[in-house]
Image (spheres, rainbow, N blue to C red):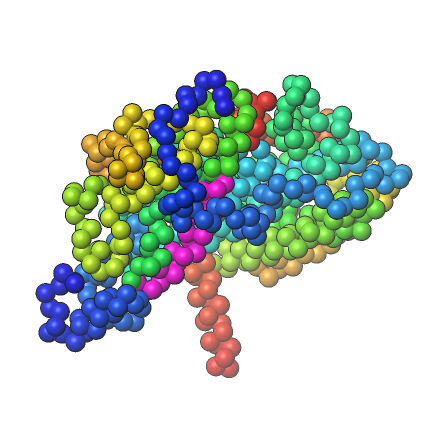
Amino acid sequence: MTATDTAGTDPLQAGFDATIGHGDRIEPRDWMPEGYRRTLVRQVAQHAHSEIIGMQPEGSWIGRAPSLRRKAILLAKVQDEAGHGLYLYSACETLGVSRGELTEKLISGAQKYSSIFNYPTLTYADVGTIGWLVDGAAICNQVPLCRTSFGPYGRAMIRICKEESFHQRQGYELLMTMMRGTDEQRAMVQESVNRFWWPALMMFGPPDDESPNSAQSMAWGIKRNSNDDLRQRFVDMSVPQAQALGVTFPDPELRWNPERGHHDFGQPDWDEFMQVVKGNGPCNTQRIAHRRKAHEDGAWVREAATAYAAKQAAMATAGGAA
Amino acid sequence: MTDHVEPASHPAPDPSDAHGSVYDGLLGGDPSHWAFGTDFEDPLAGVDTTIPEGVDARDLATYCLMLADDALIASQRLSQWTSRAPDLEEDIALANIALDLLGQARLLLARAAAADPTLVPALPEGSPVPPEDALAFFRESGEFRNVRLVETDNGDFAVTIVKLLVLATARLALLERLASSSDHVLAAVAAKGVKELTYHRDYAGRWFLTLARGTEESRRRLEAALAVVWPLQAELFATHEVERRVAAAGVGVDPATTADDVAVVLAQVFAVSGVEQPTQAALAGVQGRQGRDGLHTEALSLLLAEMQVVARAHPMGRW
């Protein structure tokens, strides 16, 4: 049931395999294969980076939120994303990699984040659409991860999913409210949905037959559902929500298939997806430059805090010895 | 539903019968998961909103605007740190403080509008924009009553910390006294705000000390920040005519009466930090007019241009 070839010869490996086989959780002090650790660091770090980079596209609208109530909602939401980043970096630290190292890997481009955040936010409706579709797609991806095999990651995901579901509700509620507003607002919502629908579908990753890391991750219990299964689930959930909202999705192939019991739908532009993944998306450079600047501008503050803490510790030691 | 959005072209099954598990959390109504100030209820529900005797309604409303605008503009500035703070913990803390101040501003703007509706900018007939938003988004810069301290640029983290220390210390001293206002709304807002500002002051004070005692670079920046901010602090304690009248009526607080207490607190922070008391003179007004009179720095209209742009484009919009 695992793809490792040492199973059965090594008691540590055998114990690990048994834990996974029973659907139990691996904890930080348990032995784990190096490949499992490496895959987890990659996935959890990518998830943490996505939360942190994801603060930018919506954060840029906090200053322009058109009502004080919406400003409070958006500020709190972006703050939650910083909190999610913190939990996930902490989960990663249990695997022996520090937040500082991970941040360096993010701003050097060595580690990735979700490509959706390389698309621009152009109107206030995008705040709602990101909540509804982007957070909705994220929830579809993340709910199964609450049962992921690595304990700290699974526990972080439970909390994150609860908060994400409120973000999704807030986003949908914003769009609902705008649809009850003026013609200009309704047009703004439809235009935003048109722009984000395909990138949201891309969030589930490439089709299963082109997803290089999926099989091993599923065997290890790190990943729980295939990309295409989750994408189908998301489409099936989103269609009735769009109808309730009064918007359409920009896919002429989208229709209910009674034989399959699912919606048929078209394929996103996977060439565009690959361009964005490779760094040529509309905002890749901007997002990393923003993060790099914040990190570099804040270096003197972090150094001051470290120096002050060291001085305090030295004084406490001197006081204790006296 | 609308005349320009196409009807949905793809029929679908009943959304309630399948695939709903992921969205279950969206259907619940647990308000504890919502951020403060994001509820749908009247924020002043249950509080006696009659105007106390002996105070002019326009004075009360104007006084509320002064308190509201300090909080609103400070919040707008602090929220600009979001995704830009020195570390994630600071990003979260500054957003918290911005949210607290935004919450205070909303209650105070609502109180201003209730006390004197003629102060609320007129919007087209039938506009759904609530009074708090009409006041925030449809006033011109000359109608804002905040002190100039809160509108100036964030600068580096040291400037932000020094500004926050001065603002939080002064506002805490003010709200402690305002909690006994004969206006029940102001008293309630003040009592709530005291708890928040105690944290804000503590946060800023701890960082002030850390920067002062951290590295040579942080100390250099902190001292430079003090020199930038200090000329702006005196305005917090200058008594405006409206403040004098509402204080006399037992509704407001004369800020000059808080100056000594604030100076003691700040002197203590400076002493612990080993920083000399700054001596820069107060920033002059223009023909005697300052922020409370609607006379601002060049920074305010730029700040408002960003803050108001979407709301003003949609005076009939629903958000």
Percent position (x, y) of residue A110?
A: 24, 48
Q: Main secondary structure of the magenta part?
A: helix
Give the residue drawn at x 36%, y 52%.
A143
Q: Quadrant of residue B125?
A: top right
Based on the picture, tell me whether residue A165 belongs to the magenta stretch.
yes
Q: Which residues are magenta?
A: A150-170
Relative horizontal placement of residue A157, taking residue B205 as reference (left or right): left
Seen in the picture, residue B265 relative to B74 is either above or below; the reply is below
Q: Nearer the viewer, residue A301 or A161?
A: A161
Give the residue drawn at x 37%, y 30%.
B11
Seen in the picture, residue B103 relative to B293 is either above or below; the reply is below
Give the residue drawn at x 43%, y 61%.
A307
Report whether residue B163 is seen. Answer: no
Report whether residue A18 is seen. Answer: yes
Q: Nearer the viewer, residue B319 or B54?
A: B319
Give the residue drawn at x 30%, y 40%.
A261
